[in-house]
Image: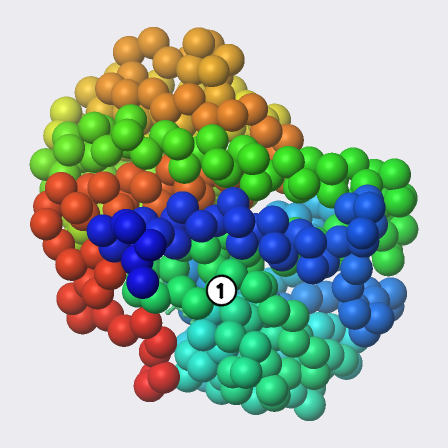
Protein backbone atom coordinates (compact mmCIF):
# COMPACT_ATOMS: atom_id res chain seq x y z
CA UNK A 1 0.00 0.00 0.00
CA UNK A 2 2.66 2.48 1.02
CA UNK A 3 4.93 1.33 -1.78
CA UNK A 4 7.91 0.82 0.52
CA UNK A 5 7.55 4.19 2.19
CA UNK A 6 7.07 4.57 5.93
CA UNK A 7 4.08 6.86 5.55
CA UNK A 8 1.48 7.62 2.93
CA UNK A 9 2.47 11.27 3.14
CA UNK A 10 6.01 10.53 1.96
CA UNK A 11 4.71 8.24 -0.78
CA UNK A 12 2.39 10.99 -1.95
CA UNK A 13 5.12 13.65 -1.85
CA UNK A 14 7.31 11.39 -3.98
CA UNK A 15 4.45 10.70 -6.42
CA UNK A 16 4.08 14.35 -7.36
CA UNK A 17 6.27 14.30 -10.49
CA UNK A 18 4.25 11.37 -11.85
CA UNK A 19 0.75 12.65 -11.14
CA UNK A 20 1.68 16.11 -12.36
CA UNK A 21 2.84 14.55 -15.63
CA UNK A 22 -0.47 12.64 -15.82
CA UNK A 23 -2.44 15.86 -15.49
CA UNK A 24 -0.27 17.59 -18.09
CA UNK A 25 -0.90 14.72 -20.50
CA UNK A 26 -4.63 15.01 -19.91
CA UNK A 27 -4.92 18.78 -20.29
CA UNK A 28 -2.41 19.45 -23.09
CA UNK A 29 -2.61 18.66 -26.78
CA UNK A 30 -0.71 15.62 -28.06
CA UNK A 31 2.30 17.75 -29.07
CA UNK A 32 2.14 19.47 -25.66
CA UNK A 33 2.09 22.97 -27.13
CA UNK A 34 -1.60 23.76 -26.69
CA UNK A 35 -4.31 23.53 -24.04
CA UNK A 36 -6.98 20.85 -24.16
CA UNK A 37 -9.76 22.05 -21.90
CA UNK A 38 -13.52 21.47 -22.31
CA UNK A 39 -15.23 23.96 -24.67
CA UNK A 40 -17.20 25.42 -21.76
CA UNK A 41 -13.96 26.83 -20.38
CA UNK A 42 -14.23 30.11 -22.27
CA UNK A 43 -13.52 33.25 -20.28
CA UNK A 44 -14.76 35.64 -22.98
CA UNK A 45 -17.11 38.09 -21.28
CA UNK A 46 -16.35 36.85 -17.78
CA UNK A 47 -15.84 39.92 -15.60
CA UNK A 48 -14.72 38.37 -12.34
CA UNK A 49 -13.74 35.11 -10.68
CA UNK A 50 -14.55 34.03 -7.17
CA UNK A 51 -12.39 31.17 -5.88
CA UNK A 52 -13.74 29.35 -2.83
CA UNK A 53 -12.18 26.56 -0.76
CA UNK A 54 -10.93 25.49 2.67
CA UNK A 55 -7.47 24.84 4.07
CA UNK A 56 -4.75 23.87 1.64
CA UNK A 57 -7.16 24.06 -1.31
CA UNK A 58 -7.87 27.65 -0.29
CA UNK A 59 -4.14 28.35 -0.34
CA UNK A 60 -3.99 26.98 -3.90
CA UNK A 61 -6.69 29.54 -4.76
CA UNK A 62 -4.62 32.31 -3.17
CA UNK A 63 -1.70 31.43 -5.46
CA UNK A 64 -4.04 31.31 -8.47
CA UNK A 65 -5.26 34.84 -7.80
CA UNK A 66 -1.77 36.13 -8.68
CA UNK A 67 -1.89 34.16 -11.92
CA UNK A 68 -5.39 35.22 -13.01
CA UNK A 69 -4.55 38.85 -12.36
CA UNK A 70 -1.11 38.79 -13.96
CA UNK A 71 -1.68 36.50 -16.93
CA UNK A 72 -5.28 37.41 -17.71
CA UNK A 73 -6.00 40.76 -16.05
CA UNK A 74 -9.05 39.08 -14.59
CA UNK A 75 -10.34 40.39 -11.24
CA UNK A 76 -10.25 37.54 -8.80
CA UNK A 77 -11.48 37.17 -5.21
CA UNK A 78 -10.50 34.31 -2.95
CA UNK A 79 -12.80 33.24 -0.17
CA UNK A 80 -12.81 30.81 2.71
CA UNK A 81 -15.86 28.60 2.16
CA UNK A 82 -17.12 28.86 5.74
CA UNK A 83 -17.05 32.67 5.45
CA UNK A 84 -18.43 32.88 1.93
CA UNK A 85 -21.52 30.80 2.70
CA UNK A 86 -22.60 32.93 5.64
CA UNK A 87 -21.78 36.37 4.23
CA UNK A 88 -23.74 38.14 1.59
CA UNK A 89 -21.12 37.74 -1.15
CA UNK A 90 -21.87 39.98 -4.10
CA UNK A 91 -22.33 37.68 -7.08
CA UNK A 92 -23.53 38.48 -10.57
CA UNK A 93 -24.28 36.80 -13.85
CA UNK A 94 -20.97 37.87 -15.43
CA UNK A 95 -18.91 36.13 -12.74
CA UNK A 96 -17.68 32.57 -12.44
CA UNK A 97 -17.35 30.82 -9.12
CA UNK A 98 -14.66 28.15 -8.79
CA UNK A 99 -14.68 25.60 -5.95
CA UNK A 100 -11.45 23.76 -5.25
CA UNK A 101 -11.44 20.58 -3.16
CA UNK A 102 -9.46 17.37 -2.98
CA UNK A 103 -12.36 15.31 -1.63
CA UNK A 104 -15.17 17.20 -3.32
CA UNK A 105 -17.15 16.59 -0.13
CA UNK A 106 -16.00 19.31 2.28
CA UNK A 107 -19.25 20.50 3.87
CA UNK A 108 -18.53 24.23 3.77
CA UNK A 109 -17.24 24.22 0.20
CA UNK A 110 -20.20 22.16 -0.99
CA UNK A 111 -22.62 24.53 0.74
CA UNK A 112 -20.81 27.49 -0.83
CA UNK A 113 -21.20 25.88 -4.25
CA UNK A 114 -24.93 25.40 -3.70
CA UNK A 115 -25.21 28.98 -2.50
CA UNK A 116 -23.57 30.36 -5.65
CA UNK A 117 -25.23 27.96 -8.09
CA UNK A 118 -27.95 30.17 -9.59
CA UNK A 119 -26.25 33.50 -8.93
CA UNK A 120 -23.26 33.28 -11.29
CA UNK A 121 -22.73 32.50 -14.97
CA UNK A 122 -20.92 29.27 -14.23
CA UNK A 123 -19.85 27.15 -11.29
CA UNK A 124 -16.69 25.15 -11.77
CA UNK A 125 -15.41 22.42 -9.46
CA UNK A 126 -11.69 21.61 -9.44
CA UNK A 127 -11.68 18.30 -7.59
CA UNK A 128 -9.64 15.17 -7.12
CA UNK A 129 -12.49 12.73 -6.55
CA UNK A 130 -14.41 12.66 -9.85
CA UNK A 131 -17.50 10.99 -8.36
CA UNK A 132 -17.79 13.51 -5.51
CA UNK A 133 -20.80 15.69 -4.70
CA UNK A 134 -19.04 18.82 -5.94
CA UNK A 135 -18.10 17.17 -9.23
CA UNK A 136 -21.74 16.14 -9.73
CA UNK A 137 -23.35 19.40 -8.70
CA UNK A 138 -21.09 21.99 -10.32
CA UNK A 139 -21.88 23.30 -13.79
CA UNK A 140 -18.53 21.91 -14.89
CA UNK A 141 -16.00 19.71 -13.10
CA UNK A 142 -12.31 19.52 -13.88
CA UNK A 143 -10.50 16.56 -12.31
CA UNK A 144 -6.99 17.21 -11.00
CA UNK A 145 -5.99 13.55 -11.52
CA UNK A 146 -3.74 13.26 -8.46
CA UNK A 147 -4.88 9.72 -7.65
CA UNK A 148 -6.10 8.65 -4.22
CA UNK A 149 -4.62 10.78 -1.45
CA UNK A 150 -4.55 8.97 1.90
CA UNK A 151 -2.38 11.15 4.14
CA UNK A 152 -4.50 13.69 5.99
CA UNK A 153 -2.07 16.45 5.05
CA UNK A 154 -2.72 17.30 1.43
CA UNK A 155 0.40 17.19 -0.78
CA UNK A 156 0.00 15.89 -4.32
CA UNK A 157 -3.54 17.23 -4.50
CA UNK A 158 -2.20 20.72 -3.74
CA UNK A 159 0.37 20.70 -6.53
CA UNK A 160 -2.08 19.25 -9.06
CA UNK A 161 -4.68 21.83 -8.02
CA UNK A 162 -2.07 24.50 -8.70
CA UNK A 163 -1.34 23.02 -12.11
CA UNK A 164 -5.00 22.97 -13.19
CA UNK A 165 -5.50 26.52 -11.90
CA UNK A 166 -2.39 27.66 -13.82
CA UNK A 167 -3.80 26.13 -17.01
CA UNK A 168 -7.11 27.93 -16.41
CA UNK A 169 -5.24 31.21 -15.93
CA UNK A 170 -3.42 30.66 -19.23
CA UNK A 171 -6.74 29.96 -20.96
CA UNK A 172 -8.20 33.10 -19.43
CA UNK A 173 -5.16 35.05 -20.67
CA UNK A 174 -5.80 33.80 -24.21
CA UNK A 175 -9.55 34.36 -24.14
CA UNK A 176 -9.07 37.90 -22.87
CA UNK A 177 -6.45 38.73 -25.48
CA UNK A 178 -3.61 39.09 -22.98
CA UNK A 179 -1.60 36.09 -24.18
CA UNK A 180 -1.05 34.93 -27.74
CA UNK A 181 -0.56 31.30 -28.73
CA UNK A 182 3.24 31.71 -28.68
CA UNK A 183 3.24 33.07 -25.13
CA UNK A 184 1.00 30.22 -24.00
CA UNK A 185 3.23 27.68 -25.74
CA UNK A 186 6.21 29.11 -23.88
CA UNK A 187 4.46 28.78 -20.52
CA UNK A 188 3.41 25.25 -21.42
CA UNK A 189 6.99 24.37 -22.34
CA UNK A 190 8.05 25.40 -18.84
CA UNK A 191 5.18 23.47 -17.30
CA UNK A 192 6.29 20.41 -19.25
CA UNK A 193 9.68 20.64 -17.54
CA UNK A 194 8.06 20.68 -14.11
CA UNK A 195 7.92 16.90 -13.45
CA UNK A 196 11.70 16.69 -13.95
CA UNK A 197 12.31 19.67 -11.69
CA UNK A 198 10.01 18.19 -9.07
CA UNK A 199 12.01 15.00 -9.14
CA UNK A 200 15.05 17.06 -8.33
CA UNK A 201 13.18 18.74 -5.44
CA UNK A 202 12.08 15.35 -4.06
CA UNK A 203 15.78 14.43 -4.20
CA UNK A 204 16.51 17.09 -1.56
CA UNK A 205 14.98 14.64 0.90
CA UNK A 206 18.21 13.69 2.72
CA UNK A 207 19.36 17.26 3.08
CA UNK A 208 15.97 18.32 4.40
CA UNK A 209 15.88 15.42 6.87
CA UNK A 210 19.09 16.68 8.49
CA UNK A 211 17.72 20.20 8.71
CA UNK A 212 14.42 18.93 10.12
CA UNK A 213 16.20 17.33 13.08
CA UNK A 214 17.14 20.85 14.16
CA UNK A 215 13.81 22.37 13.25
CA UNK A 216 12.08 19.79 15.46
CA UNK A 217 13.55 21.54 18.52
CA UNK A 218 11.83 24.84 17.73
CA UNK A 219 8.70 26.05 19.52
CA UNK A 220 7.71 28.46 16.80
CA UNK A 221 8.61 28.66 13.13
CA UNK A 222 7.81 31.49 10.74
CA UNK A 223 7.58 31.27 6.95
CA UNK A 224 7.74 34.23 4.63
CA UNK A 225 7.56 35.05 0.94
CA UNK A 226 6.33 37.66 -1.52
CA UNK A 227 3.96 37.47 -4.47
CA UNK A 228 2.76 33.91 -5.09
CA UNK A 229 5.34 32.75 -2.55
CA UNK A 230 3.31 34.45 0.16
CA UNK A 231 0.53 31.82 -0.02
CA UNK A 232 3.31 29.22 -0.16
CA UNK A 233 4.52 30.59 3.19
CA UNK A 234 1.00 30.00 4.51
CA UNK A 235 1.09 26.46 3.13
CA UNK A 236 4.52 25.71 4.65
CA UNK A 237 3.26 26.86 8.02
CA UNK A 238 -0.03 24.97 7.75
CA UNK A 239 1.72 21.70 6.84
CA UNK A 240 4.25 22.08 9.66
CA UNK A 241 1.70 22.87 12.36
CA UNK A 242 -0.80 20.21 11.38
CA UNK A 243 1.60 17.29 11.43
CA UNK A 244 4.43 18.30 13.82
CA UNK A 245 2.28 20.40 16.20
CA UNK A 246 4.95 23.10 16.17
CA UNK A 247 3.40 26.54 16.16
CA UNK A 248 4.01 28.03 12.73
CA UNK A 249 2.78 31.10 10.84
CA UNK A 250 3.22 32.31 7.31
CA UNK A 251 3.59 35.99 6.48
CA UNK A 252 3.93 38.21 3.46
CA UNK A 253 7.55 39.36 3.77
CA UNK A 254 6.56 43.01 3.69
CA UNK A 255 4.20 42.52 6.64
CA UNK A 256 6.92 41.37 9.02
CA UNK A 257 7.81 44.84 10.18
CA UNK A 258 4.16 45.56 10.94
CA UNK A 259 4.13 43.29 13.96
CA UNK A 260 5.47 39.75 13.63
CA UNK A 261 9.13 40.81 13.67
CA UNK A 262 8.64 41.34 17.42
CA UNK A 263 8.61 37.53 17.71
CA UNK A 264 12.09 37.12 16.30
CA UNK A 265 14.94 36.07 18.55
CA UNK A 266 17.72 33.49 18.36
CA UNK A 267 15.23 30.67 19.01
CA UNK A 268 12.92 31.33 16.06
CA UNK A 269 13.69 29.70 12.72
CA UNK A 270 12.35 31.68 9.75
CA UNK A 271 11.92 29.83 6.47
CA UNK A 272 12.36 32.26 3.57
CA UNK A 273 10.87 31.19 0.23
CA UNK A 274 12.82 33.22 -2.27
CA UNK A 275 13.12 32.08 -5.88
CA UNK A 276 15.10 34.66 -7.86
CA UNK A 277 12.06 36.48 -9.24
CA UNK A 278 11.27 40.18 -9.62
CA UNK A 279 10.76 40.48 -5.85
CA UNK A 280 13.89 38.62 -4.76
CA UNK A 281 15.81 41.69 -3.57
CA UNK A 282 12.85 42.83 -1.52
CA UNK A 283 12.48 39.49 0.19
CA UNK A 284 16.21 39.37 0.87
CA UNK A 285 16.07 42.76 2.54
CA UNK A 286 13.26 41.49 4.82
CA UNK A 287 15.36 38.41 5.52
CA UNK A 288 18.27 40.62 6.56
CA UNK A 289 16.02 42.41 9.02
CA UNK A 290 15.30 39.01 10.57
CA UNK A 291 19.00 38.13 10.70
CA UNK A 292 19.83 41.46 12.35
CA UNK A 293 17.55 40.27 15.19
CA UNK A 294 19.36 36.92 15.34
CA UNK A 295 16.54 34.95 13.71
CA UNK A 296 17.70 31.61 12.30
CA UNK A 297 17.07 31.82 8.59
CA UNK A 298 16.45 28.82 6.36
CA UNK A 299 16.78 30.22 2.84
CA UNK A 300 15.21 28.39 -0.10
CA UNK A 301 16.44 29.77 -3.40
CA UNK A 302 18.41 28.66 -6.42
CA UNK A 303 22.22 28.47 -6.41
CA UNK A 304 22.71 32.00 -7.68
CA UNK A 305 20.23 33.27 -5.08
CA UNK A 306 22.09 31.48 -2.29
CA UNK A 307 25.41 32.79 -3.56
CA UNK A 308 24.05 36.32 -3.62
CA UNK A 309 22.17 36.36 -0.32
CA UNK A 310 23.13 33.26 1.64
CA UNK A 311 25.86 34.77 3.84
CA UNK A 312 25.11 34.22 7.49
CA UNK A 313 21.97 32.11 7.02
CA UNK A 314 21.42 29.16 9.36
CA UNK A 315 20.75 26.88 6.43
CA UNK A 316 20.40 27.21 2.67
CA UNK A 317 18.55 24.84 0.35
CA UNK A 318 19.48 25.00 -3.31
CA UNK A 319 16.45 24.64 -5.55
CA UNK A 320 16.53 24.32 -9.34
CA UNK A 321 16.23 27.61 -11.20
CA UNK A 322 12.67 28.04 -12.49
CA UNK A 323 10.47 30.42 -14.47
CA UNK A 324 8.22 32.45 -12.15
CA UNK A 325 5.04 30.53 -13.04
CA UNK A 326 6.54 27.27 -11.78
CA UNK A 327 8.05 28.48 -8.53
CA UNK A 328 5.00 28.10 -6.25
CA UNK A 329 4.39 24.56 -7.50
CA UNK A 330 8.03 23.52 -7.18
CA UNK A 331 8.66 25.15 -3.80
CA UNK A 332 5.68 23.28 -2.34
CA UNK A 333 7.85 20.15 -2.38
CA UNK A 334 10.59 21.28 0.06
CA UNK A 335 7.89 22.87 2.26
CA UNK A 336 6.14 19.48 2.46
CA UNK A 337 9.39 17.60 3.09
CA UNK A 338 10.34 20.02 5.85
CA UNK A 339 7.02 19.41 7.59
CA UNK A 340 7.22 15.67 7.01
CA UNK A 341 10.72 15.14 8.39
CA UNK A 342 10.14 17.49 11.31
CA UNK A 343 7.07 15.46 12.26
CA UNK A 344 8.97 12.19 11.87
CA UNK A 345 11.78 13.57 14.07
CA UNK A 346 9.17 14.47 16.70
CA UNK A 347 7.49 11.09 16.45
CA UNK A 348 3.98 12.37 15.73
CA UNK A 349 1.38 10.42 13.76
CA UNK A 350 2.19 11.84 10.33
CA UNK A 351 -0.63 10.30 8.31
CA UNK A 352 -3.31 10.83 10.93
CA UNK A 353 -2.50 13.90 12.97
CA UNK A 354 -4.53 14.39 16.13
CA UNK A 355 -7.91 16.13 15.89
CA UNK A 356 -7.97 16.11 12.08
CA UNK A 357 -10.00 14.20 9.50
CA UNK A 358 -9.17 13.67 5.83
CA UNK A 359 -12.54 14.85 4.67
CA UNK A 360 -14.41 17.43 6.76
CA UNK A 361 -18.02 16.59 5.98
CA UNK A 362 -19.46 18.44 8.95
CA UNK A 363 -19.18 22.20 9.26
C1 LIG B 1 -4.27 20.42 4.98
C2 LIG B 1 -5.48 19.81 4.43
C3 LIG B 1 -6.78 20.51 4.63
C4 LIG B 1 -7.68 20.38 3.40
C5 LIG B 1 -9.06 20.98 3.68
C6 LIG B 1 -9.94 20.97 2.45
O1 LIG B 1 -3.14 19.68 4.66
O2 LIG B 1 -5.43 18.77 3.83
O3 LIG B 1 -6.58 21.86 4.96
O4 LIG B 1 -7.04 21.02 2.34
O5 LIG B 1 -9.68 20.29 4.72
O6 LIG B 1 -10.18 19.66 2.03
P1 LIG B 1 -10.73 19.37 0.58
O7 LIG B 1 -9.66 19.77 -0.38
O8 LIG B 1 -11.03 17.90 0.54
O9 LIG B 1 -11.96 20.22 0.38
Percent coordinates x, y for residue 83 in the rendering: 44, 75
- Residue, disc 1: 147
Instruction: Indicate the quadrant containing the C terminus: top left, top right, bottom left or bottom right.
Output: bottom left
Q: Is residue 168 above or below residue 123?
A: above
Residue drawn 66% across the image and 52% down it: 24
What kind of colouring is applied to the model shown? rainbow
Q: Residues within 10 Å of mark 1 (few under 14, many from 20)?
A: some
Is 302 displayed left or right of 183 in the figure? left
Q: Is residue 16 above or below residue 225?
A: below
Is 71 displayed left or right of 258 in the figure? right
Percent coordinates x, y for residue 327 in the rendering: 55, 36
Can residue 351 be seen in this snapshot? yes
Percent coordinates x, y for residue 179 in the rendering: 85, 45
Q: Is residue 357 above or below residue 312?
A: below
Residue drawn 40% across the image and 65% down it: 149
Percent coordinates x, y for residue 98 in the rendering: 62, 71
Mark 1, secondary structure of its residue: loop
Choose top left, top right, bottom left or bottom right for residue 355. Answer: bottom left
Ligand 1 within 8 Å of disc 1? The answer is no
Instruction: Indicate the quadrant containing the N terminus: top left, top right, bottom left or bottom right.
Output: bottom left
Residue drawn 77% across the image and 64% down it: 37
Can residue 249 be seen in this snapshot? no
In-front residue for pair 332/59: 332
Q: Is residue 331 above or below residue 91?
A: above
Q: In terms of image quarters, where does ligand 1 lie?
A: bottom left
Is 151 displayed left or right of 174 in the figure? left
Residue drawn 86% across the image and 58% down it: 175
Amino acid sequence: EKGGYRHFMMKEIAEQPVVLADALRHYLSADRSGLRLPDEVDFTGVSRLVLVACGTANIACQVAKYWFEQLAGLPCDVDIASEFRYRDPVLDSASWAVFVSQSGETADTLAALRHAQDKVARTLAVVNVPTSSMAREAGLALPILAGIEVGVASTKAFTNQLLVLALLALKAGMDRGRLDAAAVAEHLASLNSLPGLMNHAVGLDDEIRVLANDLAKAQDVLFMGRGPMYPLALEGALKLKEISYIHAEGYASGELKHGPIALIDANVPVVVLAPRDALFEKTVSNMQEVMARHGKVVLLSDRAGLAQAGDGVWSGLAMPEVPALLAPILYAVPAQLLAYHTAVAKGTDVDQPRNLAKSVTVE
